[in-house]
Amino acid sequence: MGDFIARRPIWSFLIIVFAAILLWLVFAVWPPALEASLGRKRVFLSALFNGITLGALYFLVASGFTLIFGLMRNVNLAHGSLYLMGGYIGYSIGELTGSWLVALLIAFLVVAVVGILMQVLLFRWMEGQDLRQTLVTIGLSIIFADLLLWSYGGDTFQVTTPEWLSGPVELPFIVGLRSSGEAVMMNYPLVRIAILFGAIVVGIAMWLALNRTRVGMLVRAGVDDRDMLSATGVRVQLVFITVFAFGAGLAGLAGVVGGTFQSLQPGEDIKILLSSLVVVIVGGMGSIPGAAMGALIVGLAEQFGSVYMPTYAVMLTFVIMVAVLAIRPEGLAARR
Amino acid sequence: MRKALLAAALACGYCLAAGPGLAQEKLKIGVLATLSGALTSGGEDGVRGVQIAAKEAGNKIAGKEIEIIVAPTDASPDSALRAARKLVEQDKVQLIIGPLSGSEGIAMRDYSKTVPNLVMINGSSGALETTFVNPSPNFFRFNSDGAMWMAGLGEYVFKDKGYKKIAIIGEDYSFPYTQVFGFVLGYCKAGGEIVQRQWVPLGTKDFGSVIANIPDDVDAVWLGLGGGDSVNFLNQYSQTGGKAKFIGGSIMVDQTVLSSRGAAKKLLVGTPSSGGVADAWDDPRWKAWVKTYQDAFPADKRFASPSLFATNYYNAFNALKQGMEKVNGDISDGGAKLRAELAKLELDAPNGKIKLDENRQAIANTFITEVAELPNGDLTNKFVKVVPNVNQTLGLTPEQFKAVGLPSRTNPECKR
């Protein structure tokens, strides 16, 4: 930290000023002049929180995507289909058992098994052939999409929010003052806060697993030099299968989460695939912190875009991607 | 050997081709319906409407067996165009019922002009431009447009409900524009004030920011969303614990939404709206249609009562059937006689008598309704009153109406 400030004094200063402005915007009661130019504070705060929670969802999907890519050099374009599949499975299980947590767990497990099958039956046999693998994943995504359309139809589904997560909570942020001088607090859906919290827990757990455990060490070694790792006697295929299963399972889990606070329908697979592609390109292919950073940026851009420039909101994420590619083509958090 | 096989295969090809020719030729009817995307539930109910009407007709029109070919769309104009081309070019269909959604309708108006033999009867689409601007001679619409469905609602919510100041949230395409157009003309004339209009893309998932953007000091929010979008919005709105009152667009409080799963739809109880049908109207013709609908499908494969879409598609099929019977099923002249008959047809539909104006646009009833909860927990649209024989210019002279301009995000302005 101190090192960073010493090396980049101007950047550090800008970051501190920006953070201070953000904190002030979040905590202060906005003066009327500011409300006139930026709109009401509630809108700003809600866009901020929505962007962060949306980023949390993107992180869940993209972290698996980036992990698989980092280790296996396999751009899994069927990742979005795994998301949608997980969501539908979670919906069915949720309807069946009435429990959201069971739905989460089973979606994770089933989609993880699908991931294992994909790795064992398909990708193992075309190792190192990037183009062929990519084409196979495109084919798989089309097949999955049709199978899902066949079994669930084109309707919109929503995973039922469990009772203990529904409804709003009051956050300690003042959004305005009533005429009596009494402060109006911010109301925010509890389920979104839970999702954000869950994503942070998953992110930290992944970071710990990667940096503090033996398996994590193997994975990191595999990302750096796969051939060397297998030469040292590690059963590298087993590591691949574990990572693929985990990455796919996370996508399935994210499907349930996405189906809870948004909804599921055909086409969602492509949308989420596109978002995770942008996220990992912005963050840097193969990097978990990069995925977190990219997800946050894309989530915030989408939400602030939809509030402050609705017509061009669709473009904004791509503008960011192009900018990152132009300035730092390896991604924001990539080491190489 | 190879030659013999080839010959056999060819012969077989001939006998297959000759097979149906020997039996009486089937009359093919294409149906365009939104079967993916936000308006899926509406498209499915529209198809049910056609199926019921076909069953009532004994699967025959003017003595000919019919074959119904459903072509799925996703509410986008290009999907409708693709589906219609497939029906015409591949299935050789000369009669089409559809499409369902506003902007699809505008695309079909233009497409139908390029296929003069085609007779197209609108399914449920309700954009103003479809029949008002450069109408197509072979496109017929036996349902009101979005603006006509809002006739009388503005005055009603201003005077009877006392909503003096409202905000508007609608999907960003032609049908909600048309609905707002009709609503604003009436509401602002009565003295109401509109403080904000928010437009969201069709198929929006995340309404968080839109909900936060609703002003605090409005009496009600007019909602012009459909199908999956409405359900999404209501779910997310209930999660934020909001307490605003609503005014419903015609497909916002339709059975596609009122029959959806989950508890969020309960927010709609008490919501005034207007449209082409009223679920709980006690007209005998309407009640008979509700009963037919309920008997035709098991309870989990349909809505509690027919949606606007089922009714419109049902009417479209019956209009086509009546027209075809008048010409004895003869469309070998390129459909000219059929078109002439359709243009002067008066349809005795479950939701009232419908006749066409010179643009082949329906003049029909608009119902003002209010959402109520039945003892069994189902939601229904209570009948409040009927505005009879609404025409496309909403009672204005054509010149006055043209002066208002076409529906858009900002037009018409809120003026007395």
Image: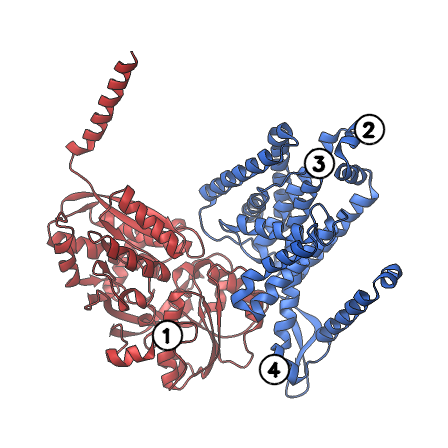
Say which amino acid is labelled 2.
Thr
Q: Are marks 1 and 4 on the same chain?
A: no
Residue under label 1: B181
Whole-percent x, y for residue A187 in the image:
64, 71
The nearer-to-camera label among 2 and 1 is 2
Say which amino acid is labelled 3.
Thr
Q: Secondary structure at mark 2?
A: loop
Residue A278 visible in image = yes
Residue under label 4: A36
Mark 2 belongs to which subunit? A
Say which amino acid is labelled 1.
Phe
Residue occupying the point 35% across, 49% down: B82
Residue under label 2: A232
Nearer the observer, B105 or B206: B105
Most extreme residue toward the bottom is A180
Q: Are marks 3 and 2 on the same chain?
A: yes
Mark 4 belongs to which subunit? A
Residue B396 visible in image = no
Q: Secondary structure at mark 4?
A: helix
Whether pointer 1 and pointer 3 mark residues with C-beta atoms closer than 8 Å, the reply is no
The blue chain is A
Say which amino acid is labelled 4.
Ala
Closer to the N terminus: mark 3 or mark 2? 2
Q: CA distance from mark 3 to mark 2?
A: 19 Å
Chain B: colour as depicted: red
Q: Are marks 2 and 4 on the same chain?
A: yes
Residue under label 3: A242
Query: Is B68 situated above or below B243?
Result: above
